Image: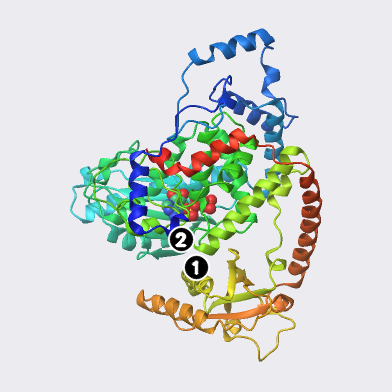
Amino acid sequence: MTFYQQPDQAKKLYYSKMWNGDYRPENGVSSSTAGHKPNNGNARNGVLQQQRQQNRPQQPQQQNRPQKTQQQHRQQQQHWPQQKPVKQLGLTSAISLAEPSTEELLQTAELNKALEPFDVFETQAELNQRMQILAKLNTLVKQWIKDVSIAKHVPEAAAEKLGGKVYTFGSYRLGVHHRGADIDALCVAPLYVERTDYFTTFFELLKQQAEVTECRAVEEAFVPVIKMKFDDIEIDLLFASLSLKEIPDDFSLSDNNLLRNLDPRSVRSLNGCRVTDEILQLVPNVENFRLTLRAIKLWAKKHGIYSNSLGYFGGVTWAMLVARTCQLYPNATAATLVHKFFLVFSRWQWPHPVLLRQPENVNLRFPVWDPRVNAADRYHLMPIITPAYPQQNSTFNVLESTKKVIVKELNRGLSTLDEIMRGNASWNRLFQAPSFFYTYRHFLVLSASSTTAADQLEWCGLVESRIRLLVANLERNEHISLARVNPKCFDYKKCDAKTQSESGTPTAFQAPFCSMWFIGLEFASAKNLNVNLTACIQTFTDQVMQHAANINMLKYGMQLDTCHVKRKDLSQYLDKDFLKRERKAMEQHTNFENAISAKAKRSSSEMSSEEEGGIAKKSRSSGSEDSS
Ligand SMILES: Nc1ncnc2c1ncn2[C@@H]1O[C@H](COP(=O)(O)OP(=O)(O)OP(=O)(O)O)[C@@H](O)[C@H]1O
Ligand SMILES: [Mg+2]
Ligand SMILES: [Mg+2]
């Protein structure tokens, strides 16, 4: 009986036991790790980084160390239990404390090199630009807080001291943002300044800045935000007003008591910063974590599974999975960690939750993810829980079909990594995916159109945040075995549509602005393709239109269309040269896959059965061990 077939009561009992630690596996490191010296790895990483900067061939760190005799090695192994205790990060012991071999260090250097062409690392000038933007925003925030307070009759001398600060979070704060990524930031104000001030006077102030474009307020969102471009860098700026008279420059957001008496929206807004800071605290070696995460994020983007709103995983979720891998292999270098990441999570027994630490027992009455208490939480498919109070499941948007896609990609990732580790493939292989457009024969093209650029920005944001409802409708249709949405949004360009038939064009495509998403379809039976999806599509369109009307967003000219398109007709919607490149990429990919599967038949996975057992146990009882 699978977990999901269990009656609700049984699930509740299961989660109670899990939370109380009844399923905790026996402590202790597997014997495969015995004799390996723990270290913090910083020195090693320093070496790697220095070598990258100096742009000279990689010299593994072992070569810089004084050579040890075999006898010294044995002595060290014998004395290991008496040496410095291993600091356990996470709720379980590590799977392996092995230090990287020379080969693994070389593989990490190769990985670093392979990432460079993908715009994963910013130049120093680009990093400086981000710092300048943040400094300007910080100054703007302080001045605004002072002005608002004076307008509210706070004496000028007191207003001078109120402070206020912009904190960063997300990928920029983690130090893993790629070129062109957004900056996620939080504006923290003292108690005199309210959310309504933020969405009125501060919003107006931002719009007046010469550097600011595309400034829009999403006040009614679950986490209210002002979105803008500052000097062409996208910024998501949240707001929280604390119950404090002053916010000094060195103020920390980590104390749970700060949340006391705050409104839920402020608590949710603070959560991003608190989570990011916790993640950085919970990994054994930040540099190894960063490089691994950069690789995993790039892989996820290339394979079309990077998007929280579409039901895949977003940045923070990938960060938590990589952080958990780092906890399980605390001394491993990035190349090994990427391999172990796929090993651990392709075997993970969902819906067992992934947790980075024991959830805190804080009673401030904010809703937390807790399947013992909330029945709805028991139905989350791939729970990955944020580490700061109030803990949330970062993957509540995951659907059966997106789960299927993610799991398939994780398995494929493991096969690729096996080949890279065997020397049969280069790291580039990890970042090459089969063409989405040549994987499926049938597609739904969803188009959102409007009459102005500003309307289109808002309309696309809203439609995108709802697409998973269409996918959910489709996955309930008995004739469809898989509906996979491509996270990339395409602009419809009339000049691309050379063969378009006048009569067959939905009206949305004639609007001045039109964006499209593609959903690849697999049918349950290849024989009967006469499937009627009208009801599915109509329900979705009605839901989106109704929602837009409810939040007063619907404007004249905003349209939504969905139509069925066969692969051979994609050229009506997409650039022909783009499709040619996709086809070529697919051919190369297929050739490689064939070559690899021939080789793979000759050699089996390198994982020891002992390690395999360890991972299965960590996963099976993850909830227990992680949360006990
Ligand atoms: N589903 C979620 N659950 C919890 N927190 C979330 C979720 N989505 C976003 N956040 C918070 O907002 C932050 C910023 O989200 P964002 O989508 O910009 O991702 P990111 O980690 O910055 O990666 P990217 O480089 O793609 O921007 C996350 O790091 C996280 O703290
Ligand atoms: Mg971000
Ligand atoms: Mg963001």
Q: Position of residue 137 (x, y in %)?
A: 42, 50
Q: Is residue 337 above or below residue 591?
A: above
The reply to whether residue 391 is visible in this rendering is: no
> Residue flagged by tag 2: what amino acid is it?
Asn
The quadrant where residue 424 appears: top right
Contact check, label 2 and label 1, Cβ < 8 Å: yes
Q: Is residue 274 above or below residue 522?
A: above
The residue under the point 63% across, 46% down is 120
- Confirm if mark 2 falls within 8 A of ligand 1: yes
Determine which residue is flagged by label 2.
Answer: 397
> Residue flagged by tag 1: what amino acid is it?
Arg
- Local SS, label 2: loop
- Local SS, label 1: helix
Q: Nearer the viewer, residue 83 or 212?
A: 83
- Does 113 sit left or right of 553 as displayed? right
Q: Is residue 606 above or below residue 50?
A: below
Residue furthest to the bottom: 503
Q: Position of residue 253 (x, y in %)?
A: 33, 41
The residue under the point 51% across, 47% down is 171
The residue under the point 67% across, 38% down is 112
The reply to whether residue 538 is visible in this rendering is: yes
Q: How many marks?
A: 2
Q: Residues within 10 Å of mark 1 (few under 14, many from 20)?
A: many
Determine which residue is flagged by label 1.
Answer: 468
Q: Nearer the viewer, residue 80 or 20?
A: 20
- Does 82 sit left or right of 417 as displayed? left
Q: Position of residue 478 (x, y in %)?
A: 55, 75
Q: Quadrant of the C terminus?
A: top left
Q: Residues within 10 Å of mark 2 (few under 14, many from 20)?
A: some
